Amino acid sequence: MKKRFTLGFIGCGDMATDLARVVRMTPGVAIGPCADPDIARRAAFAGRFAAGTGYGDAGELMERERPDALFVGIPHNLHYPVVMRALELGHHVLCEKPLAVTMRQAREMEEAARERKLKLAVNYQYRYDRSAHALIMLCRQGLLGGISHCRVNMPWRRGPEYFAAGAWRSRKAEAGGGTLLTQASHWIDIALEAMGSPPAAAMGMTARRRFKDVEVEDLGMGTVELSDGALLSVTGAMTANPHQRVRIEVYGERGTAVYTGPDDFPPASRLLLLGLRKKRYSMPFPGLFSLQRNIIGFVRWVRDDAPYDNHAARSLPALATVLALYRSAESGQKETIELDGGHSG
Ligand SMILES: NC(=O)c1ccc[n+]([C@@H]2O[C@H](COP(=O)([O-])OP(=O)(O)OC[C@H]3O[C@@H](n4cnc5c(N)ncnc54)[C@H](O)[C@@H]3O)[C@@H](O)[C@H]2O)c1
């Protein structure tokens, strides 16, 4: 029997807690040491998950401990320095999205991992949502024919506690952006994977409709032009009432595919096909829902070098797209999406 795979935690906040809950129900994976400068959060996390030693300083954990990999779930502007240090010290990393807040940082991180032959993944777990996976597969196999366009609509809702519980989420310098980067980038990632052509240019607009005293947008819309001429329209919102499912509509020559989701816990995603016969796709990894499958996929990638989609390079097109939408919202112009050096394939 294989030895249990130990995941160390950098950051003991909301997402680390969600992920630790899933790790605890995943056979063969264990929670190791954790680090968070916030004593209360660190103590609550350690108490709940009986993790290894708790550290106030992430650097100290990374120097002293050798878990099989680190999960990094901290404010976005800290991903770059913390992950770069982890790579310098020889750790494999599962980093939360977005990988970084600039393309230059993201590329450096991806290159540093590649040069050191370390595994660096980004937690875009919905790649392993059953219906999102089927959507990507059937588009990639050409079953929809040539894709003319796609619409992503994320009508989500966040209450004031969202910013109250994590003030960094409201500040541009720390979060890098609002709903487009933090939430809608999951669905832009799926749409780009399905459409299969690199994003080329974007026009975007952002607004603050409910949360007036935060620096980041709570509503963002945009149109993205892909290299093959197809168009992708994106609406990301945390202002909808009530909170609703995400919808991704892909329009092809031979048919239309409509995804609704996500496949969280309990799993509740669907794929409706118009003009096409239903096709079943098996998931590459076991698991009850997307986050668990993504953890299992990451573990197998690190341990056995098994094929895995969420490596850092694959997350760069979605990041580049959101950053171009932001640039366009500022400039009022169509902005080029800069992928070069980012290994988008
Ligand atoms: N994949 C998903 O579905 C999903 C969902 C929610 C959040 N996230 C991502 O998870 C990450 C964290 O978000 P969150 O909502 O958990 O935020 P949070 O504010 O709840 O937690 C962040 C934690 O990081 C700690 N921290 C700050 N600096 C640190 C450092 N240098 N070393 C160690 N810990 C440090 C904070 O004290 C805090 O406890 C973000 O990247 C966010 O986008 C992903």
Image (cartoon, helix red, strand yellow):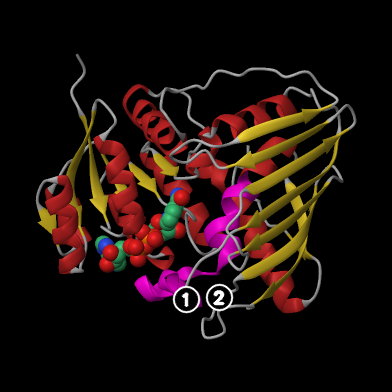
Helix, strand, or loop for circle 2?
loop
Residue 300 falls left or right of residue 239: left
Residue 226 falls left or right of residue 323: right
Q: Is residue 290 visible?
A: yes
In reply to whether residue 170 is colored magenta, the answer given is yes
Residue range of the region highlighted in magenta in the rendering = 160-189
How many residues crowd around disc 2 within 10 Å: few (fewer than 14), some, or many (20 or more)? many
The chief SS type of the magenta part is helix
- Quarter holding the C terminus? top right
Circles 2 and 1 in contact, beta carbons < 8 Å:
yes
In the image, farthest residue toward the front: 242
Q: Position of residue 167 (x, y in %)?
A: 39, 76
**Which residue matches tag 1?**
170
- Quarter holding the N terminus? top left
Q: Position of residue 49 (x, y in %)?
A: 17, 46
Q: Which mark is residue 216?
A: 2
- Closer-to-camera residue (12/192): 12
Q: Position of residue 123 (x, y in %)?
A: 45, 45
Residue 282 falls in image quadrant: top right
Mark found first going from the N terminus, 2 or 1? 1
Residue 296 falls left or right of residue 222: left
Which amino acid lies under the numbered mark 1 shown in the image of this protein?
Answer: Ser
How far is the residue under mark 2 from the one under mark 1?
6 Å
Q: In this picture, is 337 found above or below 255?
A: below
Q: In this picture, is 136 found above or below 151?
A: above
Ligand 1: which quarter?
bottom left
